[in-house]
Amino acid sequence: MLHTADIAQMRVACRLASEVLDFVTPYVFAGITTGELDRLCHDYMVNVQGTVPASLNYQPPGFPPYPKATCISVNDVVCHGIPGEKVLKNGDILNIDLAVIKDGHFGDTSRMFVVGQGSILAKRLVETTYECMWLGIEQVRPGAHVGDIGHAIQKHAEARGYSVVREYCGHGIGTVFHDEPQILHYGRPGTGEELQPGMIFTVEPMINAGRREVRTMPDQWTVKTRDRSLSAQWEHTVLVTETGYEVLTVSEGTPATPQIR
Ligand code: MF3
Ligand code: CO
Ligand code: CO
């Protein structure tokens, strides 16, 4: 949790993170590799923005250093896909997740992309997951509880026949990348920590088209669905305001807030 003086700097870092996604969007097409997309993001951060890619060499206890500036998770990859030689093809869905550091402050955001013509099923998963993230964000206000966010997300995902990944959650963020509180993407209303003005955290649900179980690959980072079903994720960094919330990871290219039936 941050002190108020840091909020202006968080707005800057978060906008910059979102602007990297704006920048890379036109390059997401069939035939490009995930490694090339990562290189484009990396160079934009370092050479254009003067930001530091937060994930590069990031090493939580028990993990090898993460080797890239972004995570690119394609189809059945749930999260932490390591960019490389994989060539995107028509119909793939992918998440590009990145965090930047600007003047010691972290901004963390991700979006989904559909390559060319996606299947009805794939597009529905991507849209529903976006709605899940927003339904979670819309719970955010002083006096609400962390469990309200998770409940809103879980309810919508499961009503659509999807499942919520349990192993990864949103997180407090500020002058460190991953902080308290944990923002679970499932739960019961009124449970968990009470939200207070000035708190900043991410909401980043991972939703599977099939079962919720995941499996980590031998590279120790890449996480896939156990049943090989498609998975989607969106992420924003959000500030708790006096009256509700402010989404910090916004820029020109931020997709519109959804109209949820
Ligand atoms: N950006 C991810 C998150 O939303 C964290 C990625 S850590 C990495 O929290 F090392 F895999 F990049
Ligand atoms: Co992220
Ligand atoms: Co995050």
Image (cartoon, rainbow, N blue to C red):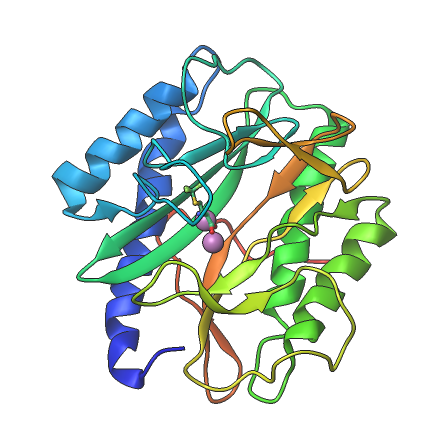
Query: In the picture, residue 198 is in which quadrant?
Result: bottom left
Q: Residue at x 70, y 73 (%)?
A: 147
Q: Position of residue 38 (x, y in %)?
A: 34, 28
Q: Position of residue 173 (x, y in %)?
A: 40, 65
Query: In the picture, residue 34 is in which quadrant?
Result: top left
How many marks the image carries: the answer is 0
Task: Judge from the rendering whether residue 134 lies leftward or rightward of residue 58; answer left or right.
Answer: right
Image quarter of the C terminus: bottom right
Q: Residue at x 14, y 47 (%)?
A: 50
Task: Judge from the rendering whether residue 84 lies leftward or rightward of residue 120; answer left or right.
Answer: left
Is residue 236 visible in this depiction of the protein?
A: yes
Q: Position of residue 213 (x, y in %)?
A: 76, 40
- 142 shown above or below 108: below
Q: Residue at x 62, y 57 (%)?
A: 133
Camera-nearest residue between 220 and 255: 220
Q: Position of residue 90 (x, y in %)?
A: 58, 14
Is residue 261 visible in this depiction of the protein?
A: no
Q: Residue at x 66, y 27 (%)?
A: 76
